[in-house]
Image: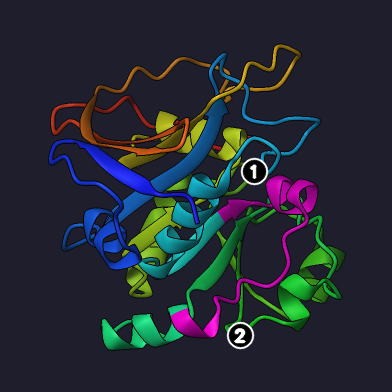
Amino acid sequence: MTSIQSLWPSPNADLTDEQLLELYAPPVGPWLRMNFISSLDGAVTRDGLSGGLGDEADHRVFELLRRWADVVLLGAGTARAEGYGAMRLPAEAERWRVEQGLAPQPVFALVTRRLDLDPASPIFTDAPVTPLLFTVSDAPADRRAALSEVAEIVDAGETVVDPAVVRAQLEARGHTRIHSEGGPTLFGAFLEAGVVDELCLTLAPTLEAGTAMRVTQAPQSAPTAMELAGVLRGGDELLLRYTKRADAGPDAQGVTA
């Protein structure tokens, strides 16, 4: 297992999983965290997938971050592209969550305007908790009927998904620790809406070139001031943590994808 060291704010070598979990503990109250990986030149995928960029340290932290989540939030396109199955954490993580007073498993929530998902997918058939699907009121009726058998469908807008409504609906269900794994379009929309509190960004030691997207993709810019909260090193990877400044946040927009 690759050693992970804390470089800042408190230097510490060879962190244990428990120490890493403590460093990544979200604050009390509602909190929305985005988790991404990027190459040195800004690519978020290699051959269309993010998994090829990460080394062992990134994979280790990726799994640990899910332990704190009440809900893991994802864009449906990313779920399809990356081959996601059911959101089921291993037994060790489940035991840890129960010890912390959390539900044994997080809820899996997908954002999908068109409801273009297969109800026979393991996302639904193997899910330990009924997934949530955030969509729009004009989503195809036949898709809505099929997926309502395997998921809870929540309208979060009429023609575009409103990120603020998604967050409010999750919090109303008691899912205040929201952990998102992307993708860039979802991140961009949530950033435009001003509802992102934190970014965990792994900087992979590679240059990719090509046409891969950045970690955010949106039609308009949304400058959002962030503060450095932590720097870890695992081999040649840097694992950065930034939180939104209290006075930061763009005007709200909507999700059109």
Residue 179 placement: quadrant: bottom left
Q: Which residue is mark 1?
A: 159
Give the residue at mark 2: 128
Location of residue 123 in the rendering, given as x and y in whole percent from the top left corner: 73, 71
**26 or 216: nearer the eye?**
26
For the residues marked 1 and 2, what is the alpha-carbon distance in whole angstroms?
A: 30 Å
Q: Is residue 215 visible?
A: no
Q: Nearer the viewer, residue 124 or 237?
A: 237
Query: How dense is the environment of label 1, judged by Cα within 10 Å: few (below 14), some, or many (20 and up)?
Result: some
Q: Residues within 10 Å of mark 2 (few under 14, many from 20)?
A: some
Using the image, determine if residue 25 lies above or below residue 53: below
Residue 58 location, x and y as percent? 50, 46
Q: The residue tagged with tag 2: helix, strand or loop? A: loop
- Residue at image position (41%, 59%) is 65
Residue 241 in which image quadrant:
top left
Amino acid type assigned to the residue bearing label 1 in the image: Thr
Say whether disc 1 or disc 2 marks the residue closer to the N-terminus: 2
Q: Which residues are magenta?
A: 74-92
Decide if residue 181 is on the left or right side of residue 5: right
Residue drawn at point x = 53 percent, y = 35 percent: 37
Image position of 207 with respect to 180: above or below: above
